Image (cartoon, coloured by chain):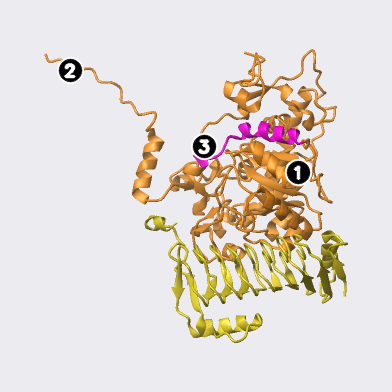
Chain colours: A orange, B yellow
Amino acid sequence: MSYSNPTTTPRKSATFDDYTLSEIRRAAATGIYDIRGGGTKRKVPHFDDLLFLGASISRYPLEGYRERCNTSVTLGTRFARKPIELKIPITIAGMSFGALSGPAKEALGRGASIAGTSTTTGDGGMTEEERGHSELLVYQVLPSRYGMNPRDLRRADAIEVVIGQGAKPGGGGMLLGQKISDRVAEMRTLPKGIDQRSACRHPDWTGPDDLEIKIGELREITDWEKPIYVKVGGARPYYDTALAVKAGADVVVLDGMQGGTAATQEVFIEHVGMPTLACIRPAVQALQDLGMHRKVQLIISGGIRNGADVAKALALGADAVSIGTAAMVAIGDNDPRWEADYNALGTTAGAYDDWHEGKDPAGITTQDPALSARVDPVAAGRRLANYLKVMTLEAQTIARACGKNDLHNLEPEDLCALTIEASAMAGVPLAGTSWIPGKTGF
Amino acid sequence: MPTFDLATTTLRSLNQALHDVAADSTDHFEVKNPRGSHALAAGVAAPVSVEIHGSTGYYCAGMNDGGTITVHGSAGPGVAENMMSGTVVIEGDASQYAGATGRGGLLVIKGNASSRCGISMKGIDIVVGGNIGHMSAFMAQSGNLVVLGDAGDSLGDSLYEARLFVRGSVKSLGADCIEKEMRPEHLALLETLLAKAGITGVAAAEFKRYGSARKLYNFNIDNAAAY
C-alpha cells in the first residue's frame, strides 16, 4: 500500500480573484482598457456606517403624522436675482441626452417636476424633452461645451459649471460611436459614429481666478438672474469648496466616487476620487470657516439611495442631495423584467454597466429607437416621483424621531458611527464612545 | 447713439442696455474707457453694433448672437467665446482662447492671437492677420481658421472637421492633424473668408490647408502613442 499526501482544497488568490483574472484576460484579448458606466463598485465607507441616535430623555421627538417637518430648500440665495425653490432637498443630477435616451430624459423631467424638484442637463446640450417637462432645469456648462448656447442659458432656471464629477475627477466625458446617432452628432457638432472623448479642462479658463471671471461672464449674459452652481468631484473637498465660494458660486455641488458616469475607464472609476462620506465634512468646514454655511448651499451626491442617506447627508451639513443612479433605477434601469435580454448580453439585471454600448435592454442608456421605446416617459416619471416622495418621507421620519421640524435642523450630534473609518470621515463619534479618530478623546 | 463711458458708468448698465434692445434692433453703441473690463458686451442677442474704444479684459463679446462688435484696442482671453452669429473685429491683438467653442459668425483679429486660438471651435470663422500661438484649433470641430502669419506648436491637435488655412509657417502639427490638398472649393472658400474679413492684397493660393487625418476618430490601441 503506497502512501499519498492528502490534497488541499483548491484555493483561489484573494489578490488575483476571479474578477481580476477575467480583466487580465479581457485586456490581453482586446488591447483596450475596460470602459463602463456607473460609479465605484467596490465597498467603501458610506452612509450605512452611520446611525441616528433618535430621541431620548434629553431630546424629545415630534409626532410622526401630526407635526410638520419642513423639507423645502432655496438654492442660489447668495447672488442670484431668481433663486430656485425646491419642495424637497433631492435633485436629479446631470445626465446627458446622448448618454440617456430622449424618453428617459423626459421621464426624469416629469418625475422631478411632480415631486417639486429640479433636473439637470448633461454633456450634450438641452433638449426640448427635458426643458418641456422640467419645471426647474439646471443647465450644465461643461468643458466640451457641446450644445452650449446663450438661448438655452437664458431659458434655464440655474447654471451649473462642471469642473469634475465623482466617478472621474480629472476626466472628461466619453461617448462611443455606437451612441453618436444623427441627432446626437448634430447637437454636439461631431461626425456620426466617432468615439467622442470630451475635453477634461474648460477651453477658456484655468484656475480659480479665471473661474471667478467666467462666472462673472455667465452672470452678465443672464443679467444676474440665475443661480450659478459649481460642481466638483470628490478630490480635495475643503479647498475645492473654498475656491468655488471664492470664485462666486451660489451653490457647490460635490460628487463622491459612488457617483455614476455614462462611460469611463474602469480604472478611473475605481481608483480616482474619494468616497462621498469623506467629502462632506471638509466641504462643510470650508463653508463654516468662510462664514458661508447655508449662504452658499451645498449639494452632495454619489451613492444616495434612500431617505436615511438623505437625512445623513443633511445632518453632516449638506443643504440638499442629488441622485443619478438611483433615479435611473427608479425609471427602470437594470430591472429584472429584462433578465433574458441582460443574459443575452452576458450579464444580469443589477450588474449591467456597459451603458456605452448603447444596447441597454431597459431603453435608458441607449439611442436605439426600439429600445428607447421601452421607456414610457409618463409611467416612468410617475415612478421617479413616487420614489422621491418615499425618500422624503423616510428622511422626515428620521428627522422627527430626532426631534427636528426641518430636515436642515439635523446635525452631526444626531449621529454615531459603526466603524472607525466612518467615524473619522464623518467626524461623528464611534458608537458607544466619545471618540472621533484624530479629534477627540482616547 | 447711446454712449457708455465705463469710467463713470458700470459694466452692468452697459450690458443690461445691450440686452434690453428689441430683437431686431440695429442701434449703435459706443463704449469709452473700457479699461480692461471683463465680459464687455457679453450676451448680445440683436443685430446692434458696438464700438469699444480701448482694450478689453476676458470674454469680450462672449456668446455674441448677431451683434457687430469692434474693439479699437486689444482683447483679453476668450474674446467672442461661444459666438453664435454676428461679427467681432479686434483691431489689435487677442489673448488666449480667442473664439473658443464658437458656433458661428466671424471673428477677425487684425493683430496676433495667442495660444489656443479657436480651441474647440464648432462652426465659427476666425481670420487672424498676424500669428497664432501654440495648441490653436485644439479639438476644433467645425468652422474655418485662417491665419495670415505663422502658427505655433501643435496646430490642430485632435481636431475633428474644422478647416485650417495658414499662410506662413507652422511650427508643428498636433496629433492627427495633417496638411491637405488645397482644392478649388477650398480656394473659393478662402477667398470668401478673406473678403468677409476685409483683407485685400493676399491671394488664397499663398495658403496651405490643414485638417484631420481622421485616424483617431475611433479607438485603436496601436494609435495609443499618438496621445
- Span of residues in magenta: A269-290
On screen, residue A175 above or below B169: above
On screen, residue A120 above or below B169: above
A433 lies left or right of B186: right
Residue A340 versus residue A203: which sits nearer the camera?
A203
Q: Position of residue A367 (x, y in %)?
A: 56, 58
Q: Disc 3 marks which amino acid?
A: Lys
First reached walking from the N terminus: tag 3 or tag 2 = 2
Disc 1 sits on a residue from what chain? A
Instruction: Tell me the tag on residue A318.
Output: none
**Foreground disc of the pair 3, 2:** 3
Residue B108 versus residue B125: which sits nearer the camera?
B108
Q: Position of residue A382 (x, y in %)?
A: 70, 46
Q: Which residue is mark 2?
A: A4
Q: Residue at x 17, y 17 (%)?
A: A4
Q: Disc 1 marks which amino acid?
A: Ala
Measure how far apart labels 3 and 1 are at the Cα level. Answer: 29 Å
Q: Position of residue A218 (x, y in %)?
A: 74, 56
* SS under mark 1: helix
Contact check, label 3 and label 1, Cβ < 8 Å: no
Q: Which residue is mark 3?
A: A41
Q: Quadrant of the C terminus of chain A?
A: top right
First reached walking from the N terminus: tag 3 or tag 1 = 3
Q: Residues within 10 Å of mark 1 (few under 14, many from 20)?
A: many
Q: Residues within 10 Å of mark 3 (few under 14, many from 20)?
A: few
**Foreground disc of the pair 3, 1:** 3
The answer to which quarter of the image holds residue A391 is: top right
Q: Disc 2 marks which amino acid?
A: Ser
Q: Main secondary structure of the magenta part?
A: helix
Residue A349 seen in the current view: no
Are dots 2 and 1 on a single chain?
yes
A209 drawn magenta: no
